[in-house]
Image (cartoon, coloured by chain):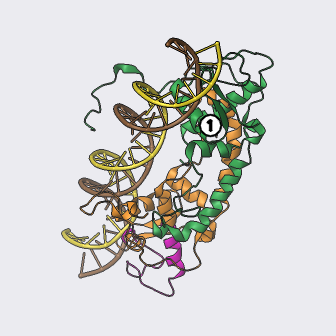
Chain colours: A orange, B green, C yellow, D brown
Amino acid sequence: MLKLSRMTDYAVLIMAQLAGADQAVAGTGSFANGGNEGMDTASGLAERTGLQQATVAKLLRLLAQGGLLTSQRGAHGGYMLARAPQDITVSAIVTAVEGPIAITACADGHSGEPCSLEILCPMSHGWNRINSAIRTALADITLAEMLPPAPLPARAAPVMAAKAGPGKDAALAAAG
Amino acid sequence: MLKLSRMTDYAVLIMAQLAGADQAVAGTGSFANGGNEGMDTASGLAERTGLQQATVAKLLRLLAQGGLLTSQRGAHGGYMLARAPQDITVSAIVTAVEGPIAITACADGHSGEPCSLEILCPMSHGWNRINSAIRTALADITLAEMLPPAPLPARAAPVMAAKAGPGKDAALAAAG
DNA sequence: CCTAAACAAGACCAATTCGGTACGAATTTA
DNA sequence: TAAATTCGTACCGAATTGGTCTTGTTTAGG
């Protein structure tokens, strides 16, 4: 445990794609939309990451709401990074997708209710120390640092939901 | 999110109780078992923490398997800390209850399977940095540091399942 | 003005995971 | 033998999560 959800993984991947495409714009020059440079559509990103279009769209919206992306509606619309990759922290991405980072329920200032479990409160000052250490760790690394030296593959193995379909769940479960 | 499960919270509380009882042994001298000093039973701990006996028992077994407690079976059996509180890290407790600490699936050396999602692999070196930072944070604080200055209350508010009694039926029966 | 492309928002469903319970077996002491 | 206590596992209900679908809203272009 102590792991963040798969969505966050996807989010970082998508952000990396956005950042990578931004870098590679001079080279490729091929975008889903017309000539809106640096703009990527949900469909295009889904194609390139191998994720489901609807899932990507949901994540993009979340990231835009978190202020990490700017969106342009309408035809020839799309998303682009709101800031340079080195100005986007992993902490910001995690927060945008999963909400505030707090490792325990009873920490970081009980908002409203006294606590879910009062007996745990005596421990809270210890947890708070840990919380801030984790936040620091996540705030200390940026999207730029997450980018691999080589550009991301144009289209990786298709990543579908592990559920539906006649073919059973071969995509995820069969990985091992 | 990014939170650890409630079980881990409970585990730390139980460990603190064990440590606290250990400290207070000279003063009180009252234990559930006969004269087995420093030994606590699951029932006794459940009583003092306000948690359910079965839940406490499960956690104690987990913690013992993780080498944090020593157990003594049979009559007058029980549990006691395997080491001094200042030699037990929060990291060890979390690991015992929740398994290995890794914030993402694709990190910390894929053990066997290549990865759940290959496309995420290019990110793994970044995640590994974050992983180790978090592990450090958790390994850096010990049970002794989690203990509040004042001894824990003998019996806090009863902590039951949040499920509100045996009047519940037929509301969500369709989900079968 | 109408249509197509694209984001916005939220409802909704299915599957997994989690918290908690129950029961039986093994072990130790008296 | 009987009682106390841990050990192990199987199980159930509920909460959370991952993912899909539907219905707007906004913009560009003919």
Q: Residue at x 76, y 15 (%)?
A: B28
Residue to which mark 1 is pinned: B64
Q: Residue at x 49, y 72 (%)?
A: A17
Q: Residue at x 47, y 62 (%)?
A: A10
Left/right of residue B127 with respect to residue D17 in the rendered view: right
State the predominant SS element of the stretch in magenta.
loop
Q: Quadrant of residue D10?
A: top left
| In-front residue for pair A79/A116 | A116
Disc 1 on helix, strand or loop? helix
In this view, B133 is above or below B45: below
Q: How many marks?
A: 1
Left/right of residue A90 with respect to residue B24 in the rendered view: left
Q: Which residues are magenta?
A: A14-43
Whether residue B127 is visible: yes
Amino acid type shown at disc 1: Ala
- Where residue A59 appears, x then y in whole percent? 44, 59
- Where residue B89 appears, x then y in whole percent? 71, 43
Q: Quadrant of residue A147?
A: bottom right
Extreme-bottom residue of the structure? A27
- Where residue A105 appears, x then y in whole percent? 57, 38
Extreme-right residue of the structure? B26
